[in-house]
Amino acid sequence: MKSLKPQVAPAENKLSRIVPGSWRTSDQSAASRGYGHAWRKARERFLLANPLCAMCTAEGTVRQATVVDHKIPHRGDKALFWDSSNWQSLCDKHHSSDKQKEENAKFSMGGGE
């Protein structure tokens, strides 16, 4: 009997995509970076007012948003962090993959700080 080839591939190394200066490299807690109680309340209000993923809507699909994203990364700028005109509602898929790839590409091409 012939044996089957393994169907499991190694996981992609995500560490290589971590951008220097990103919150992912910070040793600060989420709350100390601004994502505490006040943010959770603001996020909740924003998602109630903007329940659909902006990127899905632009693609012509409908998906519930679960994340409030900063369109322009605030990089610790409190005014930009709290500027709700800089916020957009996204689904997990778009926030976790497409938006992060976009930000990382801009950073690696010299568009970031």
Image (cartoon, rainbow, N blue to C red):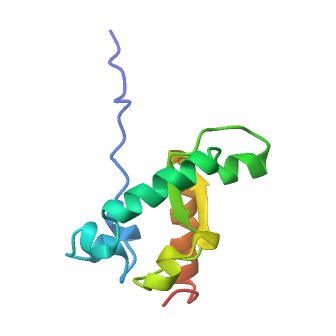
Which x, y percent locates residue 79? 49, 84
The residue closer to the viewer here, 41 or 70, is 41
- Residue positioned 68% across, 53% down in the render: 54
- In screen coordinates, is 10 left or right of 71? left
Would residue 26 be found to the left or right of residue 18 on screen?
left
Q: Extreme right residue here?
A: 60
- Give how far across and how far down residue 37 sits, in percent: 32, 60
Q: Is residue 111 above or below residue 13?
A: below
Asked if one can make out residue 103 in the rendered structure from this viewpoint, the answer is yes
Image quadrant in which the N terminus is located = top left
Please give the name of the residue rendered at 62% of the width and 44% of the height, measured from the top-left corner: 51
Residue 73 position, x and y percent, is 51, 76
Please name whichever residue, 47 or 12, is drawn nearer the observer in this view of the structure.
Answer: 47
Report how many numbered discs are placed on residues in the image. Answer: 0
Give the x, y percent position of residue 98: 58, 57
Q: Residue furthest top?
A: 1
> Is 57 left, or right, of 27 in this rendering?
right
In front of the other: 69 or 20 = 69
Could you tell me which residue is drawn at 34 percent across and 30 percent down?
Answer: 6
In the image, 21 versus 62, the foreground residue is 62
| Position of residue 54 in the picture relative to residue 29 (left or right) | right
**Residue at 55 percent of width and 49 percent of height:** 47
Is residue 96 visible to us here? no
Asked if 1 appears above or below 78 in the picture, the reply is above
